[in-house]
Image (cartoon, grey):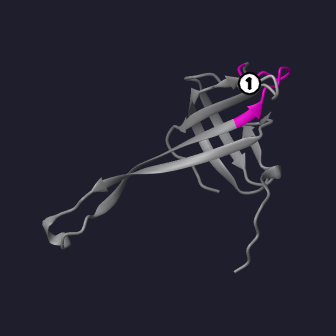
Amino acid sequence: MAFTPLSAKNAQVRFGNYVFTAKKWQVNPKGDALEITNFEGGGFADWIGGVIECDFTIDADWDSASDPFANPPNIVVTSILSTIKLYTNLVGSAFWSFPSALVTDTPFSADVRQTESFSCTCKAKGTFQYP
């Protein structure tokens, strides 16, 4: 089987048609494990999958000319973002898709030896798609 790794240098973030210039994104899908261990399992535990959820974090340098707290893109806590795509290698490549997501955290950092930075963590509202 062919092995074709990608550099993250071409990853991109889009909120609908809004271009969000970011440095890093991370996606964390999760699923509940529901225990169904029973007397007939020969002493071994058994599980089924339950509710599926996903959160993601996007990190960026603060862009004073394109304030992420402004609308658009309106990245403020409790806001709902729509049509989020996290591309693996330029627009048109495989991407994570989130039709709707709740913004839960928006930390901001200023360090004298670094650029001012912004981050947001979101939780998928409903369905999402793997690349």
Of 43 and 120, nearer the camera is 43
Is the residue 46 above or below the residue 56 in the image?
Answer: below
> Residues in magenta?
59-69
Residue 55: % across, % down: 55, 41
The residue lying furthest to the bottom in this view is 1
Q: Camera-side residue: 48 or 125?
A: 48
Quadrant in the picture for the C terminus: bottom right
Q: Residue at x 82, y 27 (%)?
A: 113
Task: Pick whichever, 59 or 55, lies toward us.
Answer: 59
Q: In the rendered image, is residue 88 in sight?
A: yes
Which residue corresponds to mark 1? 68
Give residue 86's position: percent from left, percent from top: 70, 46
On-image quarter of the N terminus? bottom right
Q: Residues within 10 Å of mark 1 (few under 14, many from 20)?
A: many
Magenta: main secondary structure: loop
Q: Which residue type carries mark 1?
A: Pro
Expressed as whole percent of the image width and height from the top left, the position of residue 127 reads: 52, 46
7 lies left or right of 25 = right
Question: Is 56 situated above or below 61?
Answer: below
| 18 within the magenta span | no
Residue 19 vertical placement versus 43 (above, below): above
The image shows residue 45 at horizontal and vertical percentages of 26, 64
Q: Residue at point 75% right, 65% down?
A: 5
Q: Is residue 90 visible?
A: no
